[in-house]
Image (tube, helix red, strand yellow):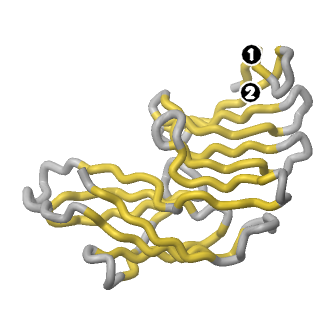
Amino acid sequence: MKKRYIAESDSSFKTSCDDSLYFGKQKQYVSVLKYYCDPRLRGISGYLLGDKYGNEFQFDYYGYLRSYEFITDGSHYSYGVFYNKDSSRHIEIGTPLLDYINMADENEDKNVRKCSFLFSSFPRATMKISYSLDGKTFREIEHNNFFLMPYVYDVVLKLPLNVKTVYFKMEATDIIKDLYGLENSKTFFGSSTLK
C-alpha cells in the first residue's frame, strides 16, 4: 500500500514523499518505510497496535546507518546504535534487553508468573542468552525469533511470584555489517524488575 503525504524534511521546507506500509503476520505490527523524495530509503519505523514500538532505523541520504533504536513507549528507546559525527564512529547505548510482557494464562499455576522478554540482536546476527535469579549463577535458555519484528528474540520464562528481578547475560556475535567503532562480538549484562 502506497500513500502520498506531506512530511517535514531535514531542512526548513516541506516536501512531498512516498511511504510504504508492511503488515506483520498478525496485522498488529506495521512497519512504515520512509523515503527521501527520490527512491532512497530514509527510515523504517515500527508500530504496534497504533503506537510507535519496536525497531526504528534512520539512514542518511547515501544509505549509511545513522541510528537504530528500539522504541518502547512511543518516544523512548531502551537500546540504540548511533553514528557519532564528531568521532566518525558508531556507538551502542543501553543493553539489548528491550522489554518484557506479563502473559496471562488461565490454565497456569497461580503461584507462577509467565513473562516474555524481548532482546535485540542488531547489529549482530546471533545471540546467546542466559538468565539468573540471583545475579550470580546464569543458565543458558532457548530463544525464538519474535514473530512480529526482525532482529528481535523472544524468551518466555515461568517465574515464582516472589521473584522481583531477573538478571540476563547476552552474548552477541557475528556483526552483520561492518559499522566502524563496533566490535564483532560483545557481552552485555542487564536486569528486568518485574511489576
Q: Residue at x 84, y 18 (%)?
A: 12
Q: Residues within 10 Å of mark 1 (few under 14, many from 20)?
A: few
Which residue is most to the left? 110
Q: Amino acid at mark 2?
A: Asp
CB-based contact (under 8 Å), mark 2 and mark 1: yes
* Image quadrant in which the N terminus is located: top right
In the picture provided, is 143 more to the left or to the right than 167?
A: right
Q: Residue at x 64, y 43 (%)?
A: 56
- SS state under label 2: strand
In the picture provided, is 187 more to the left or to the right than 101?
A: right
- Tell me residue 63's x, y (percent): 86, 47
Question: Is residue 27 in sight in this rendering?
Answer: no
Q: Which residue is mark 2?
A: 19
- Tell me residue 166's x, y (percent): 30, 67
Q: Amino acid at mark 1?
A: Tyr
Which residue is most to the front? 86
Question: Is residue 104 in sight in this rendering?
Answer: yes
Q: Which residue is mark 1?
A: 5
105 relative to 186, above or below: above
Q: Residues within 10 Å of mark 2 (few under 14, many from 20)?
A: some
Mark sitting on residue 83: none
- Tell me residue 71's x, y (percent): 54, 43
Q: Nearer the viewer, residue 146 or 113?
A: 113
27 relative to 5, above or below: below
Total numbered labels placed on residues in the image:
2
In the picture provided, is 49 more to the left or to the right than 194?
A: right
Res 4 → quadrant: top right
Q: Residue at x 44, y 57 (%)?
A: 118
- SS state under label 1: strand
- Tell me residue 7's x, y (percent): 76, 19
